[in-house]
Image (spheres, helix red, strand yellow):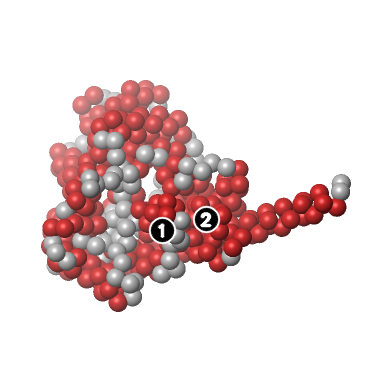
Amino acid sequence: MTSKSQTRLKLLSVKWIKLLGIALLIGAFSAFVAITLKSATEYYEEMLFEKSIHSKWLLLVFPLVGLAAIFVLRQHLFRKKENKGIAEVFDSLKTGKGLPLYKIPSHFLNGLLTVVFGGTTGIEVSTVVASAAVGSVTHDKQNFFRKYKTEMICAGISSGLTALFNSPLAGILFSLEVVSRKKSFKALLIMAFACLSALVVSHFFSPGTLFEVNVTHWNVSALPYLAVFAIFAALNSVYLTKSVLWFKSKSALFSKPEYKILPAAVIIGIGLVVLPQLYGDGYHGIKVLFRESDAAFSLGLVALLISLLVIKPLLTAVTLWGGGDGGVFAPSLVTGAIAGLLFALVANHFFDARLIPINFMLIGMAAVLSATIQAPLTAVFLVCGITGNYVLLLPLLLVCCLSGFSAKKMYPFTVYTYKPAA
């Protein structure tokens, strides 16, 4: 080997060491941000929700406090800039401008305040953008990393989602399916190292899995019902997407953003008084449904599930319209679980389908998420990560692909891809 070849090999080794080393750092810090946000949100959301159980009037007050606090922080601490969710990541990748450092505390605090005070979104999108900002800031700090901007941002996003859902595959696939179409070996390796670092941090600091669910088997006889359910999941997805986009199109209804706070808070508050199960991200309500998934069919239960399906997307849309932080990630999971349980109950009662309700709740979570963000593989492996096994892999793949295809035929846009007419 010539001295020139040796020098080239040494430079290449140094380059890879730098890239993978910074990927490990991005993964660790993104995971720390995600876990801290997750832990704080779970703690304060549970505490405030418990208080509201004993004092129902607090459900009318909490959304106002949350939205008002977000507005004050935006005006006095975050440069009067509204958070636009994942659109900020898309804009950064498109324009070449990095995400500013203040986007980390901005999305962290705004996501926390939105959910703990009852706003019906979730912290996933806040985590995604905050984690993307971690990668973006790293890319801005040294000339060497500037040509790897997309890889650094995707490393932050994938490791943040890994920390939330204990599924590195879901984190990496979300970056590839939704954020960036860049599928190079280098990008995959950087994301893999970031996710590895995130898993290590999660092992020591994560408060635990999102849902404690035990899945043992599924029945082949459920296949025809899975195909029908995929259409039902797609309908719920389109309803959620159109609800969010409709309220978004009414952003100019009030001349100033602060004028939207009170009407939004009133609508959310009334919705929570009627259906307290929808408080915050709604995961606490889904945990109850998982525990009671074998409940017998009753008109009261069916009416409750239908009400949740109808109201949840509307409250999510109003929360975002009123200035709350978040997106459609958690609402898709919650809506999907409700849709799955409703479908299984009705099919078992009227058609003796013998479906396993808990399976359909998990499949519903993946199906609605897949259809809403048009990322079937992300949805499949996210749910596998939640359950900790791959028993439902085949039905998940089938339903997610079919629901995503059906939703795209019904409505070609997602909340990420829709562009209002000029």
The vertical placement of 340 against 255, above or below, is above
Q: Is residue 365 visible?
A: no
Give whichever of 392, 318 is nearer the camera.
318
Instruction: Please tell me whether mark 2 sits on a helix, a strand or a loop.
Output: helix
Task: Name the mark on residue 247.
Answer: none
Q: Residues within 10 Å of mark 2 (few under 14, many from 20)?
A: many
When the figure is inspected, residue 204 is found, relative to residue 415, above or below; the finding is below
Residue 198, percent from left and from top? 54, 57
Give the residue drawn at x 59%, y 63%.
143
Task: Please give the name of the residue rendered at 40% of the width and 24% of the height, measured from the top-left corner.
Answer: 220
Q: Which residue is drawn at 21% across and 57% down?
A: 321
- Of the numbered discs 2 and 1, the one sitting upstream in the chain is 1
Contact between labelled residues 1 and 2, with CB atoms less than 8 Å apart: no
Which amino acid is tagged 2? Answer: Lys
Q: Which residue is drawn at 74% across and 56% down?
A: 11
Q: Is residue 223 left or right of residue 58?
A: right
Please give the residue where the numbered disc 1 appears in the rendered image. 129
The crowd level at tag 1 (other Cα within 10 Å; few <14, some 14-19, many 20+) is many
Q: In the figure, 283 relative to 60: above or below?
A: above
Q: Residue furthest bottom?
A: 76
> Residue type at mark 1?
Val
Res 99 visible: yes
- Expressed as whole percent of the image width and height from the top left, the position of residue 99 reads 43, 62
Left or right: 371 as drawn, with respect to 249: right
Residue at the spot of label 2: 149
